[in-house]
Image: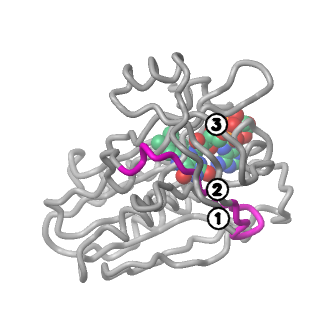
Amino acid sequence: MAERIGGLRPVSEDNAAAAARLGSTALALDIVGVVTEAPALRRITVGDPRLRDVEWHPGQDLTLSIPTGGRPVRRRYTIRRLDRDAATAELQVLLHGDGPGARWATAASAGDHLEAVGPRGKIWADPAAQWHLFVGDETFLPATFAMVESLPSGTPAIVALEVGDDIGEQPPDAAADVTGPLWVRRDRGGGSSDNAQPAEGVDGTRLAQAVAGMELPAGPGHAYAGGEHRAVAAVRAALIGRGLPPEAISAKAYWRRDKPNQGHGEPERD
Ligand SMILES: Cc1cc2nc3c(=O)[nH]c(=O)nc-3n(C[C@H](O)[C@H](O)[C@H](O)COP(=O)(O)OP(=O)(O)OC[C@H]3O[C@@H](n4cnc5c(N)ncnc54)[C@H](O)[C@@H]3O)c2cc1C
């Protein structure tokens, strides 16, 4: 059960400097609720009175300072919902196996504290688009659903998320006209909750095939892609192949299959 957030706590100098550099807000978060939504997905609700006043576009994330015992590492998690009255943000974290972020999420419990910077990120729903297409893996689920849930009633939104069988099948709670495939299933080879293996086959092949075969509405639309970095490149190529102009595609690598993300939270570039 979610508890009330504590009062306003001071932020560290390091965090204030990072926030100034990133042009966002330094936060001192309390964890106020943790729910295991599916074997590999935890919803973690964090609070800070500063969240009442932040500027937020659905699709943006919080960059958390993850405690490691030594120097913290930054890891980015998308805000699935922001509740300004309660001054809380909900995150959905994939328990993919082993890494500081996944370990933190597995152990997180109400009453823990951590620092963060946010909201931040440059991708949110394009208000000029007549339809929207979302393609990615589990890590892109919170961004996809936050954006889909922000769309006006009846707006066409096509969703293709490649997920393992340990994620659940909770659809978005949206007024938009959501069509599938919605879930593109991947066999993780066991699908246990303590899955220590990175997801097999996350190379974008299934998602690129889904993009190649889907019916796209007429008129100007916008496509959003997020997930494993080579998969995102494959999806982007498939979108270009469908005739979308580059400016109508917002693609972002969230993680790399062969390497941990860097200390500032981004996957290494090639
Ligand atoms: C803007 C942005 C928003 C994001 N939003 C979310 C979000 O809402 N929810 C979410 O769960 N993630 C999200 N991510 C992805 C998340 O930040 C990364 O997956 C992060 O690297 C996980 O940190 P870690 O410390 O657990 O693993 P790392 O230290 O980065 O990696 C350790 C090992 O785990 C592997 N690994 C990392 N991620 C995965 C994965 N997804 N599946 C399989 N193997 C993996 C790596 O290849 C490496 O071998 C987002 C990333 C970005 C850039």
Q: Earlier in the sequence, mark 2 or mark 3?
A: 2
Q: Which mark is residue 32?
A: 2
Ligand 1 falls in quadrant:
top right
Is mark 2 in CB contact (under 8 Å) with mark 3? no
Q: Identify which amino acid the numbered label 2 is placed on.
A: Val
Q: Mark 3 packing: few (<14 Cα in 10 Å), some, or many (20+)?
A: some
Which segment is the magenta one?
34-52
Residue 191 in picture, x, y percent from top left: 81, 65
Disc 2 + disc 1, Cβ < 8 Å: yes
Name the secondary structure under disc 1: loop
Please name the residue that numbered disc 1 is placed on: 2
Report, in whole angstroms, how far the alpha carbon at label 2 lies from the one at label 1.
Answer: 5 Å
Disc 3 versus disc 1: distance between alpha carbons?
A: 17 Å
The tag earlier along the polypeptide, 3 or 1, is 1
Q: Dominant secondary structure of the magenta stretch?
A: strand
Q: Position of residue 92 (x, y in %)?
A: 60, 58
| Numbered label tally | 3
Crowding near the residue tagged with mark 1, few <14, some 14–19, many ≥20 C-alpha atoms within 10 Å: few
- Disc 1 marks a residue whose amino acid type is Ala
Q: Which residue is at the far front?
A: 7
- Residue at position x 72%, y 54% from top? 110
Residue wearing tag 3: 114
Q: Amino acid at mark 3?
A: Leu
Q: Is residue 115 left or right of residue 173?
A: right
